[in-house]
Image: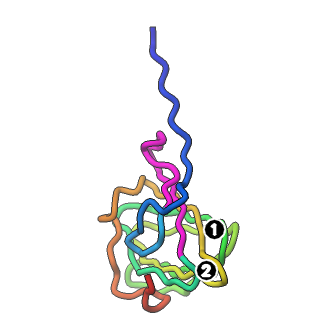
């Protein structure tokens, strides 16, 4: 007689941030290994209106961002190359490839909120490496 596997719990973002990301944004955990995910993780990211994140790069993960609300500007560039920033708003999606430097700013009256899928799952704060400068100026968080 075989035993039935347990059903993984449903993920749901908390009312308060679970942590602050190395880039200074607020992180609300949605789905991790605790929810049965083995190859990716999902968080909701919030950057307050007018805030500019710290510029960072990731060692081993790729991220996919899907904007839920707010407006913002995202700068992302591979090592040794400068690219122009892009404007984002609700329903926009973008990729932060592994090793690319990035920085983002929340514009408008409200915060910038987006879902962030990390592949492979986020390994911890040591994943993010601070970079000297981003394409959006000095950070405010």
How far from the left and from the top, in percent, is residue 141? 43, 81
Viewer-proximal residue, 58 or 47? Answer: 47
Viewer-proximal residue, 82 or 57? Answer: 57
The picture quadrant where one finds residue 86 is bottom right
Task: Determine the residue positioned at 65% across, 66% down.
Answer: 68
Viewer-proximal residue, 101 or 106? Answer: 106
How far from the left and from the top, in percent, is residue 83? 51, 85
Residue picked out by circle 1:
67
Query: Quick one: label 2, few (<14), some, or many (20+) residues within 10 Å?
Result: many
Residue picked out by circle 2:
72
Question: Horizontally, is 88 left or right of 24 in the view?
Answer: right
How far from the left and from the top, in percent, is residue 36? 47, 39
Most distant residue in the left direction? 126
Q: Earlier in the sequence, mark 2 or mark 1?
A: 1
Q: Which residues are magenta?
A: 28-47
How far from the left and from the top, in percent, is residue 131? 34, 81
User: Would you say the residues marked 2 and 1 are in contact, meaning their CB atoms lie under 8 Å apart?
Assistant: yes
């Amino acid at each position: 007689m075989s035993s039935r596997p347990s059903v993984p719990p449903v993920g749901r973002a908390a009312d308060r941030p679970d942590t602050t990301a190395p880039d200074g944004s607020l992180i609300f955990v949605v789905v991790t290994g605790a929810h049965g995910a083995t190859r990716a993780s999902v968080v909701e990211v919030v950057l307050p209106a007018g805030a500019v994140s710290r510029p960072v790069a990731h060692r081993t993960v790729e991220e996919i961002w899907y904007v839920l609300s707010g407006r913002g500007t995202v700068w992302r560039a591979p090592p040794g190359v400068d690219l122009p920033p892009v404007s984002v708003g609700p329903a926009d999606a973008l990729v932060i490839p592994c090793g690319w430097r990035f920085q983002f700013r929340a514009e408008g009256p409200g915060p910038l909120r987006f879902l962030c899928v990390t592949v492979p799952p986020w390994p911890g704060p040591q994943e993010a490496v601070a970079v000297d400068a981003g394409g959006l100026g000095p950070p405010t968080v």
